[in-house]
Amino acid sequence: MVNTIFNFYAYSNKLAAGGQPTEEQIIALKDDGFEAIVSISPTSTKNYLPAEAEVTEKLNLEYVHYPIDCSNLKDNHYHMFKNIMKGLAGKKVFVHCGGNIKSSNLIHMYNVLEHGVSEKESIKELKRIQQPEEKWFDYFKRMGLQGLS
């Protein structure tokens, strides 16, 4: 059932991303062994789930809500995301936003900058999920990537 989450993509057996999960899909994430959920959706996102923190708490899932407005990307957005991910090291983590656009872009940067994944290979993987808007390539460059497209 986790692959019914909109735009679901498993990067590894410890990291996946997708769009906003429903309550039932959060239960499926727990059943699939996920230990933490990171939401980067602002509360203004049209498919935002107000009960997400409550649902994850009942399931004993670690939950982090760090809303990012991608119309105004700041350097600290990536740095905070990186720190959140480092704090969850070793856990099976699901990262989401409304539709897996922000999530997949941030994971792309994280995999390249923190785990040494080739930017060329990572961008190929990113394009299997979505085609980033130009502002993301500018952000990638600002954060230390080449910004390959």
Image (spheres, rainbow, N blue to C red):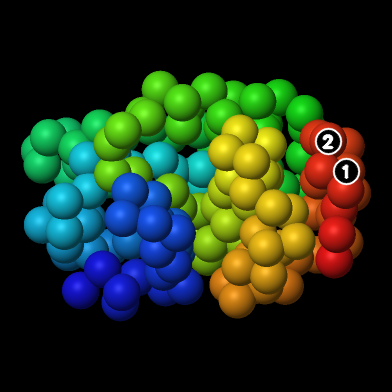
- What residue do we see at 31% from left, 74% from top? 3
Number of labels in the image equals: 2
Residue picked out by circle 2: 144
Image coordinates of residue 15 in percent, x first then y, are 39, 50
Vertical position of residue 53 compared to residue 25: above or below:
above
State the residue in front, 71 or 127: 127
Q: Residues within 10 Å of mark 2 (few under 14, many from 20)?
A: few
Q: Is residue 105 visible?
A: no
Q: Quadrant of the N terminus?
A: bottom left
Position of residue 83 measured from the top left corner of the image (x, y, whole percent): 53, 23
Q: In the image, what residue occupies the spot 68% across and 37% down? A: 113
Looking at the image, residue 147 lies above or below residue 116: below
**Where residue 139 appears, x then y in whole percent?**
83, 44
Q: Measure the alpha-carbon separation of dots 2 and 1.
A: 5 Å
Is residue 84 found left or right of 109 in the rendered image?
left
* Label 1 SS: helix
**What secondary structure is marked by label 2?**
loop
Please indicate whether residue 20 sits to the left or right of residue 80 in the image. Answer: left
The kind of residue on which mark 1 rests is: Lys
Q: Amino acid at mark 2?
A: Gly
At 18% across and 44% down in the image, what residue appears? 55
Q: Place residue 116 in its image quadrant.
A: top right
Above or below, 9 against 58 in this view is: below
Residue 90 x/y as whole percent: 31, 33
Around disc 1, counting alpha carbons within 10 Å, would you say few (fewer than 14), some (14 to 19), or many (20 or more)? few
Q: Is residue 107 visible?
A: yes
| Residue drawn 71% across the image and 47% down it | 70
Check if mark 2's residue and mark 1's residue have beta carbons within 8 Å.
yes
Residue 141 is tagged as 1
On the rendered structure, is 130 left or right of 67?
right
